[in-house]
Image (cartoon, rainbow, N blue to C red):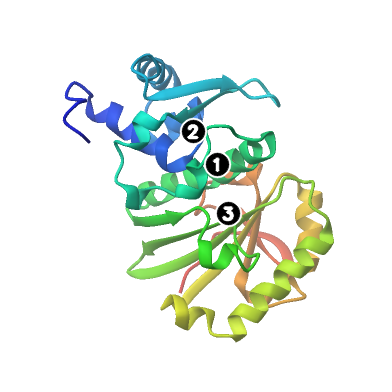
Amino acid sequence: MPPNQPDLTDVDRDIVTSVAESGVLTTSQVARMLQVRSSVAGVTLRRLRERGLLTSYPSQADRRLIWQPTTKALGMVPVERLDLCNHVSVQRTQHYVEHQLLLNDVRVAMTEGLRVSSQFFEFWYDPYLPFKRKGLADAYAEYDYNGVRCGVFVNVDRDKEGLSRWIAQAKRYDAQLRAGLRRRLRREDVVVLIVTRSESKLARIRGACQKGSPEMFWLTTFERLHRAGFFGQAWSRPMDSDHRALLHS
């Protein structure tokens, strides 16, 4: 952090960094990421808004308060930790905000799961640009799990995408796998996560995933993810509907 913010606490700095890295966050998401009560997070967020580091506005969908960084805040975070594509403009479309909040729900759940299991969270690219251009993931993450470096492609469904999109997506992943995806990433363990808003949509997407390389895919809903946790019995595979834990080799 720069010297012109000497009186920020460690929690202040962590919050500014988290919001800057994520683009947009709700109060609840900030609280979960930093393991503090929502009321504590809310007080700190409002203080940082008064300092000119954050701005906020209510969600059009459910009136939750959404926080985003100011230019001043972005200048406090090392550029290599930022997804610059998320910060080109202060103005956000409703589509962007809705999609980004869903994606950040997955990121928060992943962070919580790795923290509970004492695993190491390495980085999160949102989006992982080389693959975004190929129409693949919404985000790509890597973390250490039981001594294995895992590559994870993350896709979220807003329940507005047609099934044809997921069939095409499964075929794209299959093509990338055959073209040496694991070799290019230098990761033997690479999985694709799909998180949906409903069980009915999950069931339809499961069928679409069978069009590609089904062994790559793990599917869940946001409700399951919140209830069972990232490494809990939250996931299904394309070939069956059983709930199981996310496994890595």
- Residue located 38% across and 18% down the image: 40
- Which amino acid type is shown beneath numbered disc 1? Asp
The circle drawn on residue 27 is none
Residue that badge 3 annotates: 233
- Above or below — where is 181 with respect to 198? below
- Above or below — where is 173 with respect to 107? below
Tell me how far mark 2 sits from mark 3, CA to CA.
Answer: 22 Å
Q: Secondary structure at mark 2?
A: helix
- Which amino acid type is shown beneath numbered disc 3? Gln
Residue that badge 1 annotates: 105
Nearer the N terminus, badge 3 or badge 1? 1
Answer yes or no: do the residues labelled 2 and 1 have beta carbons within 8 Å?
A: yes
Nearer the N terminus, badge 2 or badge 1? 2
- Above or below — where is 39 with respect to 67? above
Q: Residues within 10 Å of mark 3 (few under 14, many from 20)?
A: some
Looking at the rendered image, the disc whose residue lies closer to the viewer, 3 or 1, is 1
- Which amino acid type is shown beneath numbered disc 2? Gln
Q: Secondary structure at mark 3?
A: loop
Answer yes or no: do the residues labelled 2 and 3 have beta carbons within 8 Å?
A: no
Name the quadrant containing residue 172: bottom right
Pick the front one: 112 or 143:
143
- Residue located 65% across and 37% down the image: 98
Tell me how far mark 2 sits from mark 1, CA to CA.
Answer: 7 Å
Residue 171 spot, x, y in % from top left: 72, 75
Answer yes or no: do the residues labelled 3 and 1 have beta carbons within 8 Å?
A: no
